[in-house]
Image (cartoon, rainbow, N blue to C red):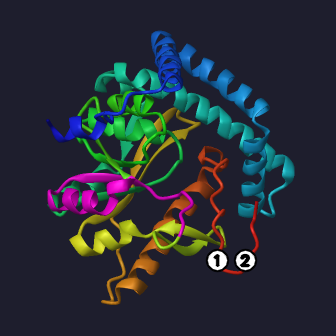
């Protein structure tokens, strides 16, 4: 069995009736949006996202709270507009995900372009592996898929979905052109092996963690528990780390897959201090990009859920 096949193989346990029904709904949903013309699919995605915005009050409240924490000086009306625009982008992303298995590179290049590809190629050609630092920003699912369409397949660190059937369905789409998934339950070993093989792995590094896997570093001026594994593995292997985000450019009416220059990592010989310093660096890069594109980040995630000892909850 190939590594890609191993990555998306289903657990051997027999699925429950509920899992089978959820899979059937997900399969039907994906195939219905896939069958529509892209413009219609994106419009349908926006409608679905608008319904979700109205019907899921808890997520809306989390989004508002996060925007208050991140942009305390922003007028409430502007924060509300950012949150509504975020749902529009999520609706588009939903449509793109359902449609992307039908995309060929020539077709996708009509609405996606590269910027800074030379940064990625230079880092890749060093031969020590590449970590693409990214987050739940823009069209993150489409970014790795388009990169594989262009002939640059990569690994992705993914949390397993609770429904193994849906997990397999989603990962089959992600891996259609050579991508592979690395599950978080095999995080460190998978990353070290990939870097030693000179591969590329994308890391979504903007989610809440808990100690000891996470370290507290500033994010919008508030201590946020953040995964430190990328910082530790990058120094251990000598792999390159560079930012990569697929963002919607309103003026161009298209997505831009933008790679930044390779980041310079702290390497003082004090492994814990370096892990903290580099994790803070990675988080600052993500924050800077969010500040430039605030309506394209996933504000409904409770990013500051884990608090330093003695601090009260923020939600």
Q: Position of residue 37 (x, y in %)?
A: 49, 11
Q: Are marks 1 and 2 in contact (CB under 8 Å)?
A: yes
Mark 2 Cα within 10 Å, few/some/many (few <14, many 20+)?
few
Name above or below for residue 173 compared with residue 229: above
Mark 1 Cα within 10 Å, few/some/many (few <14, many 20+)?
some
Q: Is residue 43 left or right of residue 158?
A: right
Q: Is residue 196 magenta?
A: yes
Task: Using the rendered view, name the quadrant where residue 18 is placed.
Answer: top right
Question: Under tag 1, what secondary structure?
Answer: loop
First to last magenta residue range: 184-210
Of residues 6 and 227, the one nearer the viewer is 6
Residue 151 in sight in this render:
no
The residue at the point 65 percent across, 63 percent down is: 304
Q: Is residue 82 magenta?
A: no
- Count of numbered circles in the view: 2
The residue at the point 79 percent across, 31 percent down is: 54
Q: Which residue is under mark 1?
A: 308
Q: Which mark is residue 41?
A: none
Q: Quadrant of the C terminus?
A: bottom right
The residue at the point 50 percent across, 74 percent down is: 280
Q: Which mark is residue 311?
A: 2
The residue at the point 27 percent across, 65 percent down is: 240
Q: Is residue 143 left or right of residue 33?
A: left
């Amino acid at each position: 069995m190939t590594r890609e096949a191993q990555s998306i193989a289903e657990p051997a346990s027999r699925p429950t009736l509920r899992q089978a029904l959820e899979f059937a709904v997900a399969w039907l949903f994906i195939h219905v949006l896939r069958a529509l013309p892209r413009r219609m699919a994106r419009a349908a995605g926006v409608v679905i996202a608008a319904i979700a915005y109205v019907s899921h009050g808890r997520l809306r409240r989390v989004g508002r709270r996060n925007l208050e924490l991140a942009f305390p000086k922003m007028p409430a009306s502007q924060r509300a507009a950012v949150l509504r625009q975020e749902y529009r982008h999520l609706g588009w992303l939903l449509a793109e995900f359902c449609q992307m298995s039908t995309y060929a590179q020539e077709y996708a290049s009509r609405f996606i372009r590269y910027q800074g590809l030379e940064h990625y190629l230079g880092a890749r050609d060093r031969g020590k592996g590449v970590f693409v630092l990214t987050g739940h920003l823009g069209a993150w699912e489409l970014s790795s898929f388009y990169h594989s369409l262009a002939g640059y397949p990569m690994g992705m660190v993914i949390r397993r979905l609770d429904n193994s059937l849906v997990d397999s369905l989603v990962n089959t789409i992600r891996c259609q052109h050579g991508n592979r998934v690395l599950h978080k339950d095999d995080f460190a070993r998978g990353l070290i092996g990939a870097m030693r093989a000179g591969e590329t792995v994308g890391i979504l590094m903007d989610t809440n963690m808990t100690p000891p896997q996470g370290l507290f570093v500033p994010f919008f001026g508030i201590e946020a528990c953040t995964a430190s594994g990328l910082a530790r593995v990058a120094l251990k292997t000598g792999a390159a780390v560079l930012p990569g985000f697929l963002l919607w450019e309103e003026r161009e009416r298209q997505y831009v897959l933008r790679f930044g220059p390779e980041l310079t990592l702290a390497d003082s010989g004090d492994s814990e201090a370096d892990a903290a310093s580099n994790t803070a660096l990675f988080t600052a890069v993500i924050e800077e990009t969010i500040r430039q594109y605030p309506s394209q980040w996933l504000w409904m995630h409770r990013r500051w859920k884990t608090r330093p000892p003695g601090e009260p909850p923020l939600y």
